[in-house]
Each structure stands twice: as structure tokens, then as C-alpha cells.
């Protein structure tokens, strides 16, 4: 069963119906994708939308059990409030992890509040998913820095260095608590990860945002196509597309 | 009616590190993708340091396949007068496009270090392809600076700043009439948005093979931008730029 480990909810250009997963499920069906890890979008861009979107994400997950695994977010610049919202996401809402976008959310991975969030995530055995590949707050090396400081916490490189910094992500992936998600690297980088990285921790994602208009769904088709086209053995491809995600995000 | 032509704007010929494209394999990929011609460029090492070797390889390959390969050339501006001389030599030997890769070559795209090269490009009517994207020393707005200073030179924003400078693209690419934007790494679904917002007369399709799959990229692009509706982006825009040097 293919798992798309990088899907966004409710982009500002196209707010999805608050808790209706039918459009997303339709897209997943159309591409033969069994499960999706659903992340905030508006909540990553606007602190004032964060809490409500976390609630929505929990409601969406409840409507599609086994198919949608939602993760939440909080805003580390808000200090104690951010730590509490992270706890609420995992403990009260039952979300499966937390997503952070330090570049967009305007915080450094060295932020003391974020250290506490890393501890909270470890306590709940919940992965922290990052946007990575972008200076000055989101380099793969900075996430690897967190992996060194918080060995009990699991970190997902949401883009594996995106395009130009894929070598950085490959280097970061030597840490046992880092899982690279192959969502954005070009085909040659994907092939290199398949050859050189630990293949039992590689994930795949589309970065689908549900934007309207022509090409709205192109991200799933294109990014799934990259992994399907890449030269690698079929066992590795299956690990990337399905088996590894089942380990990191078990259905329970 | 102008005849449709298909040109892949950026393919890397050579075998080095992650690059593994030979003349034969590139021709095969072009045939598979129904692409008539391709601009050929050098792997990173030859952009950064071994300029002469890289340029010679491209010129030789193009001389063997003059109807299929269009030779680019690259020089690292840190080589100063030698870079300028090498660029002149390449232009005189038939190079049709100058490639700059600030990230790999080690400077900011709008650094005055590159101005002497742009003066040469202007003299030979060579369009200038600039790789853009993170970490930030080659961004769409930096290319705009160059386009404003060198108004007679055509600039191609390689990769459309992919990915993190995507927000800038609709404004930057439209900021000067001598700016064009190339699709590789920008992903077809995003490139289509730029074409629709900036204009089909500015978009140029390239694959960046073998970093991306040539056939795969062209198939995806054709699905997103039907060639009958957008013939210019598949070759005519680029041909217009490349032919300026020939008609002078």
C-alpha cells in the first residue's frame, strides 16, 4: 500500500471544506495511494489559524480511519503556548506527529522552546517532520544538529534537501533518528539515496496542496512518477513507497 | 505558419559523479521523447574548473551531430582574462549559449565579476543561461539585475529559482523584456503557472538530463502544456534567441 508522507491540508488559495476529506481521498484513489500523512498548511503560515486547523486535521483523520494520518503544528515563537499546543496535538487530539517549517514560521532550530517540543515529541514517540533544504533555518544539517542533540526524537526531512541540497540530506541521513522523505529531489538524487542511504528509512511524498486550477494534481503524478521511473531494485522501491511508512506511522 | 520545433534547452553531456550521459544515450533519449535538438552543457567539474576540456567536448560532439546537438560553453569568471578569452574562442568555434552556474562556480549571480563575460556574450549575441535556486547566490531577482544592466543580452532563468524562489518568479521573470525562464527542476505543474502568468513567449522547456529523465520530463510537460496550444515553449522561443548570433 503506497503511503504519501507529505500532503498538505487547506492551502490559502483553496481552503478545503473544513473537515471533508472526500476530495483528498478521491485524489489518493486516482493515483492508487492507500494512505496519506496529512499536514497543516494554513496553520504553518498563520499562527492564528494553527489551533483551529489542528482540530480540523483531527476531525479529518477520524473520518478516514486507516487512510489519513494527520499531524499538527505549533508556533515555537509563542513559547509555552507552543509547547502546550504540541502536547495537545499528540495527547488530546491523537495526531500522529508534528510538522514544522522554520523558514515560514520564523524560528531557528536552536530556539529553546523548540528543544522542549523535541522532548514532548519523544515522550509520545511521535515524529517531527520538517521542511528542509532551505537556508537559513531549514538546512538538512540543522535538522541533523537536532538529531544529535535529541537522540530519542525522530526527525523526518520532509524534502530530503529539496533540489540543490540533496547531498546535505544524504549526509544527514546517517543519523539513526533521521528519516528522509523523497519529496522533491530529482530523479538522480532519488537513485543515489536508494543506493547509498539506509533504504529502511526512506519515505515518499507528493507535497499535494489541493490548489485549484490546471495542474492542481500534477504534484502527485509527477513526484510518484519520479520514484517509479528511478532505477532501483523493486524491494527498495516498495520500501520507499509503502513498507517504511508503515513502520514510522503504524496504524493503530 | 512557423514550423514547430522541439529543442531541449539543457542536457548535460559527460560522465562524472552523478552525470552519465553519452552522445549515444542522449540521442536515444531524444528519439524516445520525440525531441529534435538539445542544447548540450558540461558536468559541474567542467563548469567550475576544467572549462576548456568541457567546452571542447561539447564542440566536438556538436560537430559530429550538427543537426541534433547545440553546443553551449561555460567559463568560470574567476579566471578573469583567461575566461574572457576562452569565451571568445568558444563563440568563434560555434558555441551558441553561455552557461553560468554561480552556485557551482562560486560567486553571486549579480557580482560585477561576471560583467566582462556578459560584454563578450553581448558582442557575440549569445544568450546566457544562469542556473538559479537555493542556497541564494543565484536567484531570479539577481538575474533581473543583470538583465537591466545588459539590455541587449537575453538571459534564461534556469530552473525558475526552484524551488524556494518560486514566489519571486511571476514578478522577476516579467521585470525585463530580455528575460526567459527554463523549466527543468521547476516541475511541469509549476512551470505551467509561470507560462500562464508571465507569457508563453518567455517559457523554454528543458529537462536537465540526466539529472532528470528526459523522456519523463517531456511527457509530463506535454500533458501539462499541450504542444499545439503552446508550441513556442517547446523550441521556438529558444530558437529565436539562438538564431540572433547566426543572423548577426
Image (cartoon, coloured by chain):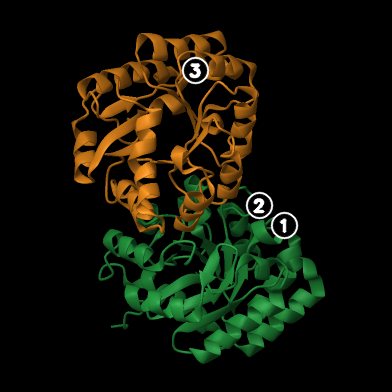
Q: Nearer the viewer, residue B225 or B214?
A: B214
**Which chain is drawn using green?**
B
Q: Which residue is mark 3?
A: A121
Of helix, strand and loop, which one carries label 2? loop
Q: Is residue A39 visible?
A: yes
Q: Which residue is mark 1?
A: B107
| Left or right, residue B78 beside residue A194 | right
In percent of width and height, residue B25 lies at 44, 76
Q: Quadrant of residue A106?
A: top right
Of helix, strand and loop, which one carries label 1? loop
Residue positioned most to the right: B81
Q: Are marks 3 and 2 on the same chain?
A: no
| Left or right, residue B129 beside residue B171 | right
Q: Nearer the viewer, mark 3 or mark 1?
A: 3
Circles 3, 1 touching at the beta carbon (< 8 Å): no
Q: Nearer the viewer, mark 3 or mark 2?
A: 3
Q: CA distance from mark 2 to mark 1?
A: 7 Å
Q: Which residue is mark 2?
A: B137
In percent of width and height, residue A48 lies at 43, 18
Amino acid at each position: 500500500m503506497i503511503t504519501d508522507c507529505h500532503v498538505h491540508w487547506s492551502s490559502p488559495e483553496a481552503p478545503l471544506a473544513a473537515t471533508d476529506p472526500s476530495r483528498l481521498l478521491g485524489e489518493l484513489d486516482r493515483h492508487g495511494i492507500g494512505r496519506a500523512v496529512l499536514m497543516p498548511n494554513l496553520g504553518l503560515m498563520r499562527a492564528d489559524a494553527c489551533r483551529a486547523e489542528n482540530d480540523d486535521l483531527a476531525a479529518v483523520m477520524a473520518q478516514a480511519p486507516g487512510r489519513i494520518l494527520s499531524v499538527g503544528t505549533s508556533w515555537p515563537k509563542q513559547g509555552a503556548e507552543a509547547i502546550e499546543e504540541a502536547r495537545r496535538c499528540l495527547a488530546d487530539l491523537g495526531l500522529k506527529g508534528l510538522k514544522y517549517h522554520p523558514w515560514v514560521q520564523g524560528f531557528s532550530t536552536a530556539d529553546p522552546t523548540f528543544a522542549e517540543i523535541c522532548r514532548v515529541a519523544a515522550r509520545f514517540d511521535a515524529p517531527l517532520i520538517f521542511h528542509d533544504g532551505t537556508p537559513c533555518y531549514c538546512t538538512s544539517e540543522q535538522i541533523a544538529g537536532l538529531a544529535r542533540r535529541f537522540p530519542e526524537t525522530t526527525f523526518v526531512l520532509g524534502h530530503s534537501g529539496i533540489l540543490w541540497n540533496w547531498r546535505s540530506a544524504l549526509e544527514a541521513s546517517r543519523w539513526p533518528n533521521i528519516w528522509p522523505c523523497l519529496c522533491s529531489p530529482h530523479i538522480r538524487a532519488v537513485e543515489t539515496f536508494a543506493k547509498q542511504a539506509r533504504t529502511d528509512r526512506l519515505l515518499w511524498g507528493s507535497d499535494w496542496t489541493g490548489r485549484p486550477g490546471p495542474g492542481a494534481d500534477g504534484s502527485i503524478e509527477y513526484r510518484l512518477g519520479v520514484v517509479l521511473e528511478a532505477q532501483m531494485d523493486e524491494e527498495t522501491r516498495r520500501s520507499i513507497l509503502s513498507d517504511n511508512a508503515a513502520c514510522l506511522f503504524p496504524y493503530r | 505558419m512557423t514550423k514547430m520545433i522541439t529543442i531541449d534547452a539543457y542536457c548535460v553531456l559527460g560522465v562524472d559523479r552523478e552525470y552519465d550521459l553519452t552522445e549515444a544515450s542522449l540521442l536515444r533519449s531524444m528519439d524516445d521523447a520525440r525531441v529534435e535538438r538539445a542544447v548540450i552543457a558540461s558536468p559541474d567539474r567542467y563548469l567550475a574548473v576544467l572549462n576548456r576540456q568541457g567546452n571542447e567536448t561539447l564542440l566536438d560532439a556538436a560537430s559530429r551531430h550538427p543537426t541534433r546537438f547545440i553546443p553551449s560553453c561555460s567559463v568560470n569568471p574567476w579566471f578573469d582574462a583567461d575566461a574572457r578569452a576562452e569565451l571568445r574562442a568558444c563563440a568563434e568555434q560555434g558555441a551558441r549559449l553561455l552557461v553560468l552556474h554561480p552556485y557551482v562556480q562560486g560567486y553571486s549571480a549579480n557580482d560585477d565579476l561576471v560583467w566582462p563575460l556578459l560584454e563578450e556574450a553581448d558582442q557575440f549575441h549569445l544568450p546566457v543561461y544562469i542556473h538559479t535556486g537555493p542556497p541564494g547566490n543565484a536567484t531570479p531577482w539577481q538575474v533581473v539585475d543583470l538583465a537591466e544592466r545588459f539590455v541587449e543580452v537575453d538571459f534564461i532563468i534556469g530552473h525558475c529559482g526552484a524551488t524556494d524562489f518560486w514566489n519571486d518568479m511571476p514578478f522577476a521573470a516579467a521585470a525585463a523584456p530580455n528575460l526567459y525562464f527554463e523549466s527543468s527542476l521547476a516541475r511541469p505543474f509549476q512551470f505551467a503557472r509561470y507560462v500562464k502568468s508571465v507569457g508563453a513567449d518567455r517559457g523554454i522547456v528543458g529537462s536537465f538530463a540526466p539529472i532528470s529523465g528526459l523522456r519523463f520530463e517531456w511527457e509530463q510537460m506535454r500533458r501539462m502544456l499541450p504542444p499545439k496550444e503552446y508550441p513556442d515553449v517547446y523550441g521556438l522561443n529558444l530558437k529565436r534567441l539562438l538564431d540572433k548570433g547566426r543572423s548577426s
